[in-house]
Image (tube, rainbow, N blue to C red):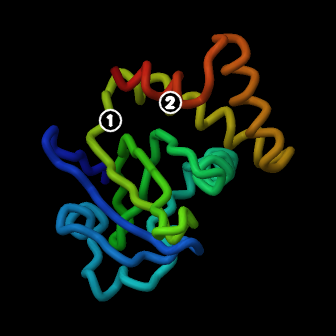
Amino acid sequence: MLKNMKENDFIVSKTDTKGRITYVNKIFMKMAEFSEAELLGKPHNIIRHQDMPKAVFKLLWDVVQNKEEIFAFVINKTKNGNSYWVYANITPSYDKNGRIIGYYSVRRMPNPKALDIVIPLYRSMLEAERTGGINAGTKILTDLLHEKGVSYNELIISIQG
């Protein structure tokens, strides 16, 4: 079953530098159908959905580890086998010396019109990844960005509206 976020919902989580969950808000727990105890200390990919291209996560990690923020559309799976789409903003968290100590993510309800673009794109990327690995999925995305003359964040922000 596909679950939908409410317009004013914000899913918030924090992870350490290895992607282990250090904080979740109540909306995260409700949407993911996990308790706080089941989430804290676990890898964030506990909610990774099989319909997410690996190339998107590689891009996400490359960007945030480079001390930049990223926006992305992500489909997550729940403990009970349901799923839900989010519009995510992920940013690094720093210590007083400017070193990355973790990552902070805020997710909102995605624009349904954006998903009309993202879902077919992700399907194409997944199909390419099945035969050619992450690089093949990345090529689908980079070809689209080149064709449109925009960066990844510019594309994502523009279709969210």
Q: Nearer the viewer, residue 114 or 161?
A: 161
Residue 135 screen position, x and y as percent: 82, 43
Q: Residue at x 69, y 30 (%)?
A: 141
Which circle marks residue 13 in the picture? Answer: none
Residue under pointer 1: 110
List the single residue furthest toward the bottom. 37
Spatial distance from mark 2 to mark 1, Cα to Cα? Answer: 10 Å
Q: Residue at x 46, y 46 (%)?
A: 74
Tell me which numbered mark, 2 or 1, is placed earlier along the sequence: 1
Residue 118 screen position, x and y as percent: 50, 30
SS category of the residue bearing label 2: helix
- Is residue 38 depicted above or below 12 in this figure? below
- Quarter of the figure that contains the C terminus: top left
Instruction: Classify mark 1: residues with Cα within 10 Å, few (<14), some (14-19) or many (20+).
Output: many
Q: Residue at x 49, y 77 (%)?
A: 20
Instruction: Classify mark 2: residues with Cα within 10 Å, few (<14), some (14-19) or many (20+).
Output: some
Q: Quadrant of residue 73?
A: top left
Residue type, numbered disc 2: Val
Left of 90 or right of it: where is 111? left
Left of 64 or right of it: where is 16? left
List the single residue furthest toward the top. 148
Q: Residue at x 37, y 83 (%)?
A: 40
Residue type, numbered disc 1: Pro
Residue 113 screen position, x and y as percent: 35, 21
Residue under pointer 2: 118
